[in-house]
Image: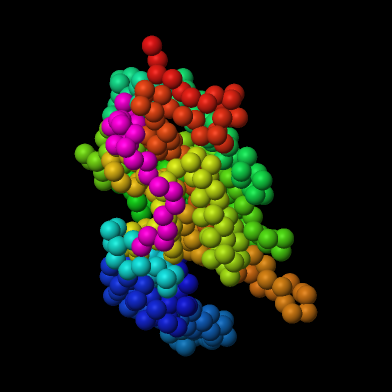
Amino acid sequence: MIDIKDLIDDPEKYKASQRARQADESAVDKLIAAHEARSAAITRFETLRAEQKAHGKKVAQAEGEAKQQLLAEVKQLAEEVKRAEAASAQAQDQLRSLQASFPNLIHPEVPAGGEEDFVTLRTEGTPRDFAAEGFEPKDHLELAEAVGAVDMERGAKVSGARFYFLTGIGARLELAMMQMGLDQALQAGFTPMITPTLVRPEAMAGTGYLEAHDDVYHLERDDMYLVGTSEVALAGYHGDEILDLSGGPKRYAGWSTCYRREAGSHGKDTRGIIRVHQFNKLEMFVYCREEDSIAEHEKLLAWEEQMLHKMELPYRVIDTAAGDLGLSAARKFDCEAWVPSQGTYRELTSTSDTTTFQARRLNIRERTVNPDGSKGATRPVATLNGTLTTTRWLVAILENHQQADGSIRVPEALRGYLGGLEVIEPLG
């Protein structure tokens, strides 16, 4: 959640952020009003309770009619205290509810607008000219079925639409790129993690994903959620803890299966494995000091681009517009690879700086150090996340490295993870 004190001190900054997000800027005034109402309710409750205690002492010293009068007043005060306590709790709940739904303050550099208002920061690599090579590029599903990599029909038979089997070389390709990503993460100092895919509501709420309820799977009987990214589990990993960041950021690489309803994408990308309900992903997650988050964000983006270069994929980097950031992100960079069959770029990686937003919700802090070297107060840490590789990468790999005869050239960096395999040949 946002820093309510900062919002009260500089409401215009938050209103500008809301305008850039194309969100309701009056939410700022509602938050301030709710905070004032909570303060007033707490003050009234504490005042009445103090008065109640004072009357209690007077009763002990009084006699006769005066005591009976004081007892009646104490009874009346008790009822008022009870009502004031309930009003205080209600005001606290109202403030908490408004804070929970209020999005993160965006970075000043973030472009304003909605999904189509992103800014392209740079383009890397040149898409192949298949016409010059003398053949029309096939889409990833046709290629995958020809080499025995994906079985959509049996995936649908077993689990329904948008499920699939990765078979043969498809399974090997995914494991190979996941392992390559993990090796890169290890070299960069990340701790590898295999994370839970079922989490409690507190973890979902803490990362801001509970608000995206249409896109998540909820197991009502157990009140548990299937995660759409290991970010959720990794953010909750240090919940209610005080971290020691004196040695630098804590970096984790989470390998997990992910689940998404894709509820808002009916009729969109229904062919193949671009938008599916289940996939695997290797996610980077970082805890760092708030003042280090911008530099750390650039590092995460660089590691993502390093992987894309290894896969020999043409791509572009976009600065996502404010209205497309989601609840938690203050800034988000996407890397989109060229997909020949669609003649456009599609997202493969995403890295977000959520500043202290998630840490405030999950109560994750660091201990500061005073100028004299003694222990100082605690403060929220910053959290960031970024994708190193995921199942969707197979789409770009198959399409960009296809050959006229239907075979697939394996990127050089990936060959060592496939026993030296250089070319994937069609079956039969």
Out of 219 and 426, give the one closest to the viewer.
426
Q: Residue at x 29, y 58 (%)?
A: 115
Above or below 83: residue 327? above
Out of 128 and 318, give the one closest to the viewer.
128
In the image, residue 241 lies in the stretch drawn in magenta: no
Q: Position of residue 221 (x, y in %)?
A: 39, 36
Q: Residue at x 42, y 82 (%)?
A: 10
Above or below 249: residue 110? below
How has the structure been colored for display? rainbow
Farthest residue, direction left:
267
Q: Position of residue 327 (x, y in %)?
A: 38, 60
Above or below 193: residue 408? above
Question: Where on the picture, by quarter, is residue 89?
Answer: bottom left
Above or below 428: residue 212? below
Judge left or right: residue 175 versus residue 82.
right
Q: Position of residue 278 (x, y in %)?
A: 40, 34
Give the position of the C terminus as an image quadrant. top left
In the image, residue 122 lies in the stretch drawn in magenta: yes
**Which residues make up the magenta segment?**
119-142
Tell me, yes or no, if residue 224 can be seen here: no
How many labels were placed on the picture? 0
Give the position of the N terminus as an image quadrant. bottom left
Q: Position of residue 271 (x, y in %)?
A: 27, 32
